[in-house]
Amino acid sequence: MGVSSVLPLLLLFACCWALGRANLSQDGYWQEQNLELGTLAPLDEAISSTVWSSPDMLASQDSQPWTSDETVVAGGTVVLKCQVKDHEDSSLQWSNPAQQTLYFGEKRALRDNRIQLVKSTPHELSISISNVALADEGEYTCSIFTMPVRTAKSLVTVLGIPQKPIITGYKSSLREEETIILNCQSSGSKPAAQLTWRKGEQVLPGEPTQIQEDPNGKTFTVSSSVMFQVTREDDGADILCSVKHESLKGADRSTSQRIEVLYTPTAKIRPEPAHPREGQKLSLHCEGRGNPNPQQYLWEKEGSEPPQKITQEKALIFPFLNKSDSGIYGCTATSKMGSYKAYYTLNVNDPSPVPSTSSTYHAIIGGIVAFIVFLLLILLIFLGHYLIRHKGTYLTHEAKGSDDAPDADTAIINAEGGQSGGDDKKEYFI
């Protein structure tokens, strides 16, 4: 056979080979599949084969397995479920992202005690992975060794739990109206977490969260800062930094920093009693508040130059008030942050009693008691009159029924020691 007759045959063979290599599955004629060996050892190689299929065969999906993507928190447990309608007398197999066989049917292939069989039937293969680590993240493959081999992918996403945030920047007490800058940081989140600031129930506008990848290349460290001017109301306040992340499932993970604010004192004077009268005992209490609390007090009476200094005690006491005690009194409360002076005007009233709430109350009670006694007296009077009338009526009826009773115009009343026709005595009422 000459060269001219061989060339057409070579060209025909080359065309057929090219068509065989092409993946024409969408047209329903030629299909190239990678057949993975379902052995109990890691799958290191794939067998490439070309399979002739008809359009009707490709339209059938009964032998196509299906799975679902899963999301799990690091340290948790994930279940991988693979199902198929028509198994064609073949077994299902699970492989990890490194293409190592985990389970072939009910047979374990990888010695990892974290991986356990959940269910194995001709139509389903389910396995569980406990104590999931970030390294377990990836695409897991479910395969069924039909002709051709069919696979389904399950993407496992592992969430990194953010660590408890740490607040830095607070060193010591602050003076009123000073500016404070606090920093907050949390590591280990995947994906990156968000940080928020609060002062009690008030939301603080912090800087946007900064994100930095951790050395492991999988998790992130987030940070934020907040700056504000403190007031005396902020003394003892808790500044909270909270981390928000889907792995926490709504749980609060926050850190608080209590701040101390130093401020000048305030004071007010409280009299006891509130309405002093001549002859009474009066105490004027100087109530100071500040941080630190006032340690020194000075009482003065205004009206003279310089004002008359009375005492350095917290309370000014008048054992017996006189009219001459009337006037304006000042109390100066002093701490290392400064001083504050409060004033009180004392007007000594006459000693005559003033109706008070308690006396009015007693008067009302007395009136009620007197009214009740009056009603009882009236009741007794009516009761006595009633008894007397009924007793007289009874005796009259008794006399009329006796043979010895006198006529209607006569009434015989035996006096003491008197006698009327015998020892028996009868009294009649007409």
Image (cartoon, rainbow, N blue to C red):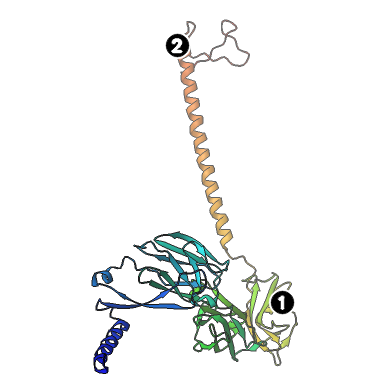
The answer to whether residue 170 is left or right of residue 88 is right
Q: Nearer the viewer, residue 231 or 21?
A: 21
Residue with the mark numbered 1: 315
Q: Nearer the viewer, residue 382 or 217?
A: 217
User: Badge 1: few (under 14), some or many (20 or more) residues near its Cα, within 10 Å?
Assistant: some
Q: Nearer the viewer, mark 2 or mark 1?
A: 1
Label 1 secondary element:
strand
**What mark, if any, has residue 288 been given in the picture?**
none
User: Residue 172 at x, y = what percent?
Assistant: 67, 87
Residue 81 visible somewhere in the drawing: yes
User: Residue 64 at x, y = what percent?
Assistant: 34, 68
Report the residue that reaches farthest toward the bottom. 4
Q: Quadrant of the N terminus?
A: bottom left
Asked if residue 308 is positioned above or below residue 96 in the image, the reply reads below
User: Residue 226 at x, y = what percent?
Assistant: 54, 88
Q: Nearer the viewer, residue 412 or 34?
A: 34
User: Residue 254 at x, y = what percent?
Assistant: 57, 77
The total number of labels drawn is 2
User: Badge 2: few (under 14), some or many (20 or more) residues near its Cα, within 10 Å?
Assistant: some
Q: Mark 2 near mark 1, Cβ–Cβ under 8 Å?
A: no
Asked if residue 19 is positioned above or below residue 400 in the image, the reply reads below
The answer to whether residue 114 is left or right of residue 120 is right
Q: Quadrant of residue 346?
A: bottom right
Residue 429 visible somewhere in the drawing: no
Q: Amino acid at mark 1?
A: Ala
For marks 2 and 1, the one nearer the N-term is 1
Residue with the mark numbered 2: 400
Q: What is the spatial separation of the Cα atoms under label 2 and label 1, in whole angstroms? A: 91 Å
